[in-house]
Amino acid sequence: MAAGGSTGVVVVALAANLGIAVAKFVAAAWTGSSAMLSEAIHSLVDTANQALLLLGIRRARRPADAVHPFGYAKELYFWSFVVAILLFSLGAGVAIYEGVDKLMHPHAVTDPFVNYAVLAVAFVLESISAAKALAEFNRIRGATPALVALRASKDPALFTVLLEDVAALTGLTIAAIGIAISHATGSPTADGYASVLIGLLLGAVAAFMSVEIRSLIVGEAAAPAIRRGIQEAFASEQGPGRPIRAVNEIRTMHLGPADILLGASVDFDDGITADAIEAATTRIENTIRTHHPEVRRIFIEGQSARDYARAERTLEGLPPSPDDTAVPAPATALPTLTSSIEAEPAPDPALPRTVPPQPAAPQRESRKGRKRQKGKRH
């Protein structure tokens, strides 16, 4: 998703929630409704959340530097996680507290029609914000089911606003029902129960957001469609008469919604030149960037399949396999010298380390050796 699309969605949500929060606080103070106060706190928290998301979007655009060589794209994930924590601790916690306090110390709701008017205005404004977020979300997901697309989304700014808007519309409905029941029956308990339900709703949304954003912070792979496109780019250079013998592995990770890191290990044919390897690498990178511009950093390593398998076993802490240890001797190795060294007995560990074992004296000395000995005698 383009950064401009998510930024526009967040700005609209920020403006709507700010106006709604002010109206709800005035109505809650006027009528004494706990459900309305919970909704006011909910809108205030949403306003702060959108401000934090805008901060995250802005900071994520900073260029890479020596301290952060891959850039700051993951800042958006961090600030989105902070939003989830705020929604859970402030939004859900305060709403549940207000509801329980209303149940323990009930007091009647006055002027309920003021609440109805404010809830109606809030519902309209929240619907506008939700419609914009939903339109952007539907454009991206296409024919993918909504829940699947929501969990697969790499843009926390978009799905955070969408979830908050859905939760807000649901909370407004709960608040209206609770106030209406209290108005009709004269009992304030329904208003208190409505506040508790709103808090539980916000807690559920915050928990879902926390799980999804945590996964993004840890590092998620690119979408299956992007991974298939990357595999096809490598496959186009693989096969008889082509430079790649085998692809050992391809790994991707989202650094941001539109910033993907790609690392690949490739077994090039041993008979090709360095120029051919460079040309093949350039073709692969150009193909990937043409079809998937969000893949911004590409690292391709030339490595034999056997060396790759050995490295993987080492990383996993496994002992080397027989195939890994069967490395052929270098062409310059001397078999006779190797066998004579292997035939020597191991030094006695009881001997002092300062007296290493000496090899046997040779039977014949060379001409240079005799001259050296003669010079020492003189």
Image: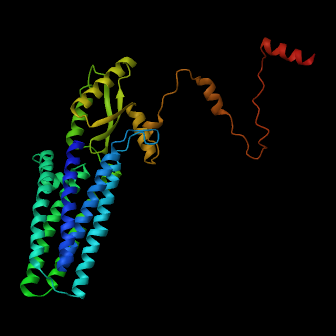
Residue in view at x 24 percent, y 43 percent: 3
Taking the image as drawn, is residue 196 in sight? no
Indicate the quadrant containing the C terminus: top left, top right, bottom left or bottom right. top right
Quarter of the rendering containing residue 90: bottom left
Q: Could you tell whether 277 is left or right of 326 in the image?
A: left
Q: Give the left or right position of residue 132, taking residue 338 as reference.
A: left
Q: Nearer the viewer, residue 110 or 330?
A: 110
Could one spot residue 127 in this view of the protein? yes
Vertically, is 345 above or below 154? above
Here the colouring is rainbow
Q: Residue 303 at x, y = what percent?
A: 40, 31
Work out whether 38 lies above or below 270: below
Q: Residue at x 61, y 28 (%)?
A: 338
Q: Which x, y percent locates residue 26?
A: 20, 72
Q: In the image, is residue 23 above or below residue 304?
A: below
Q: Position of residue 18 (x, y in %)?
A: 22, 61
**In this view of the protein, which residue sits in the foreground, 304 or 251?**
251
Q: Residue furthest right?
A: 378
Q: Nearer the viewer, residue 362 or 104?
A: 104
| Quarter of the figure with residue 17 | bottom left
* Residue at 28 percent of width and 59 percent of height: 49
**In the image, farthest residue toward the left:** 184
Q: How many marks?
A: 0
Q: Position of residue 364 (x, y in %)?
A: 78, 17
Q: Residue furthest top?
A: 367
Rendered residue at 22%/74% (across/down) = 37
Q: Quadrant of the N terminus?
A: top left
